Image (spheres, rainbow, N blue to C red):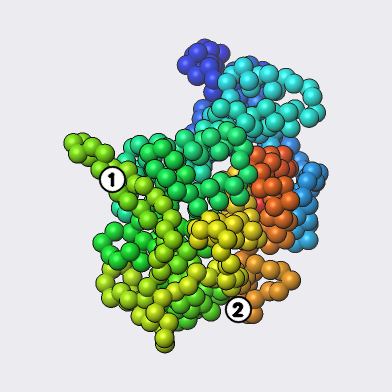
Amino acid sequence: MKKWLRSAFLAFPILAVSSADCTYLDNPDRFLYTPGQHWREISGWTDRVARRELNLAAADKVTVPRRNLVDEHIFSRMERDGIQPAPLADDQEFLRRAYLDLTGRIPSVEQVRSFINDSNPAKRDVLIDSLIGTEEFVDKWTMFLGDLFKNDGPSSNVNRYLQGRDAFYYYLKEAVSLNKPYWRIAQEMIGATGDTFKDGAVNWVVGGTVPMGPIQDTYDGQAVNVAQMFLGINSVDCLLCHDGARHLDAVNLWGKQQKRADIWGLSAFFARTQMKREVVNADPLYARFIVSEMTAGEYALNTRIGNRTSREPVGDIKQAAPRYPFTGETISFGLPRRQALAVTITWDPQFARAAVNYVWEKLMVEALVLPSNGFDLARLDPGNPPPAPWTLQPTNPELLEALSQWFRDNNMDLRQLITLIVKSNAYQLSSSYPNTWSAAYVPYYARK
């Protein structure tokens, strides 16, 4: 047995456990990492997995302290419904999680040892503060925004070419590095003008290009992007082809009540956007877009071809006027249309809700509203619940509203939002559950 153990430790110095009183010695295979197991310790440390499982087996009830508004809402809901939370993750589980979520990297051996041996009771908060804003953090969260805003280079709709993709990437990276308020990032992208190779933010509006049809198809594509990415509302894509009635009846309560003519008002904000494509090099081919805002141009209701159903006049109305369909606002223009839309969107409470939901999903895996771009505006308010058989959409509507208001009160600071969530005990729960796990506990975030 001793000879086998010596060979095992030499072969797997990081996965083996050398504690003399380890309860796993009766089954050496349990030293090895297999998919679904928890991270094992470095050789020479206490077997945390055995210790944790013993503790959980002995625990009758877990009480987790509440640290901030996230915990107040998460644990109050569990307490109300008789759901027991998992215990807090131990230091090693937490450390790996925090590094991966905040920086996309795992900690080094030295960083692990230093953290485990640190006796400071506030060391988790200290660690979080030390990771927020690092180069690795900037890289990780630039990627998050790049995914959200679809900075994926060539796509089925438009080729920004490598120069445009890179300019967009560097714009987002600078925004994360400088910790620009989220509302400012949105306003700069939605209202941007300039050269896609030089002015990174302008690549966002180019991403709404829809080829093989009339220009109204592209206006619609830009409206779909602004609604999905900034407001989390994907039903706009359906509504730009037809009324919601009979199409969204079983899918989206707000959407089923909307008219196509009202959603055209969102597309009309883009009707004065000119995107001029200029070939920079013929072989290999690459081209840039020069984006500007014209002083004239309307969303005409006069198409019978393209990617959408025909656009026909509504009575005597032959063109759609800009109108914000989510609140019914008709915007007075002291600004160019897209800039006016950007201001309106970022003042809309739904803008903060969508942002909070996207970040929550990234850190907590399960969004408060699923899918995260599928908000139903008629099913969000716990003070005004929808009629049966509809139910409230968020898993925790009170938390969604509280977080959204907190985000607005704090100037939509993404770093502060991430810090708030990661410092909560709800985020720091163990992934091991002391009792029988049920899928019904997932919306409660009863374990990580």
Residue position marked by numbered label 1 in the rendering: 278
Residue at left offset 41%, top offset 37% = 198
User: In which quadrant is the C terminus drawn?
Assistant: top right
Name above or below for residue 445 compared with residue 172: below
Amino acid at circle 2: Pro
Q: x%, y% of residue 442?
A: 62, 55
Residue 225 in sight here? yes
Q: Earlier in the sequence, mark 2 or mark 1?
A: 1
- In this view of the protein, which residue sits in the foreground, 334 or 314? 334
- Side of 87 relative to 369 (left or right): right
- In this view of the protein, which residue sits in the foreground, 52 or 241? 241
Give the Cα separation between the discs numbered 2 and 1: 53 Å
Q: Mark 1, residues whose alpha carbon is within 10 Å: few (<14), some, or many (≥20)? A: few
Residue 389 numbered tag: 2
Name above or below for residue 38 compared with residue 274: above
Q: x%, y% of residue 71?
A: 75, 49
Q: Which type of secondary structure does the marked residue at label 2 adopt?
A: loop
Q: Which type of secondary structure does the marked residue at label 1 adopt?
A: strand
